[in-house]
Image: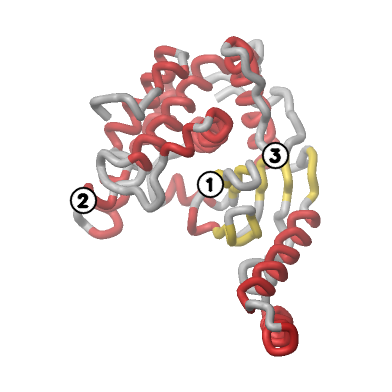
Amino acid sequence: MRWQGGRRGGNIEDRRGVSAAGVGGVGMVGVILALVGYFVFGIDPSTTMSVVEGGAQQTEQQAGVRGTTADEGGQFVDVIEQSTTDVWTPIFAQAGQRYQRPASIVIYDQATGTGCGMGQSAMGPFYCPADQKVYLDLAFWRELETKFGAKGEAARAYVIAHEIGHHVQHLTGQTAQVERGARGADSSAVRLELQADCYAGVWVAHAPKVSAGEVSLDPADIEDGMRAAAAVGDDAIQKQSQGRVMPDAFTHGTSEQRMRWFRIGLESGNPGACDTFKARRL
């Protein structure tokens, strides 16, 4: 995959090495404050704990270093995020809209505070609509290779582009179509994830054009991206983790579906072809 030398946007929030202590677990001080607030002032303890936790999250978020990073792993994320911005900006403009890039791509170790609660490495990469940030522990790249068998930089780029796809959904209001707690083979949650896969394909289709070839994937790279999409299919993960497939518990779609929608976006280059919410066949 070609990316080195590509333009970097500096939209990285590097929290690696920043302690997550107090985030998601406010500690004894928070408990004491909650008890004092309740017995002395009659304040609901959950209100106090929420305020303390929010302060802890804000403190840690401010501790991260914003801008470009010196290491290759951080630079890769930076280049890919900038490339997605270069792709989605004119697409939105053609529709008479303005693309607003994510607030940042947060790189962290193990755990960090987010606008959606406590973020942990075990969750994998994710997008938080509440603060419009993508969260990524770079240790996931090793898991992607060793656990899921998806190797190469193209597989990593697919993951980033997929999460940016969720940001696009947030900007266009499509995220609101997902029912709370939805799951199952035909659920709105699955449709949302498959659409993000399709949007990742749209990025691959346009990236070489908007970056003058500085960021591009050749056919072999695209196959790596397809393998990454297949590796994180619900059926593949369920077989690996529990030995059987349970469609009623699907939240992301099957391997076949994820590859197919990625290819739809790639071959069409048109986000309008990614309307999984109206699609009869997923």
Q: Amino acid at mark 3?
A: Ala
**Mark toward the viewer: 3 or 1:** 3
Q: For the residue marked with disc 2, what is the amino acid?
A: Val
In-image side of 236 versus 84 (left or right): left
Q: CA distance from mark 3 to mark 1?
A: 14 Å
- Image quarter in which the C terminus is found: top left
**Residue found farthest to the front:** 42
Element marked by disc 1: strand
**Mark 1 highlights which residue?**
126
Indicate the secondary structure of the residue bearing disc 3. Answer: loop
**Who is closer to the viewer here, 147 or 103?**
103
Q: Which residue is disc 3 drawn over?
A: 103
Q: Position of residue 255 (x, y in %)?
A: 30, 37
- Closest to the observer, 63 or 281: 281
Badge 1 amino acid: Phe
Camera-side residue: 113 or 136? Answer: 113
Q: CA distance from mark 1 to mark 2?
A: 23 Å
Residue designated by label 2: 245
Crowdedness of circle 1 by 10 Å Cα count: few (<14), some, many (20+)? Answer: many
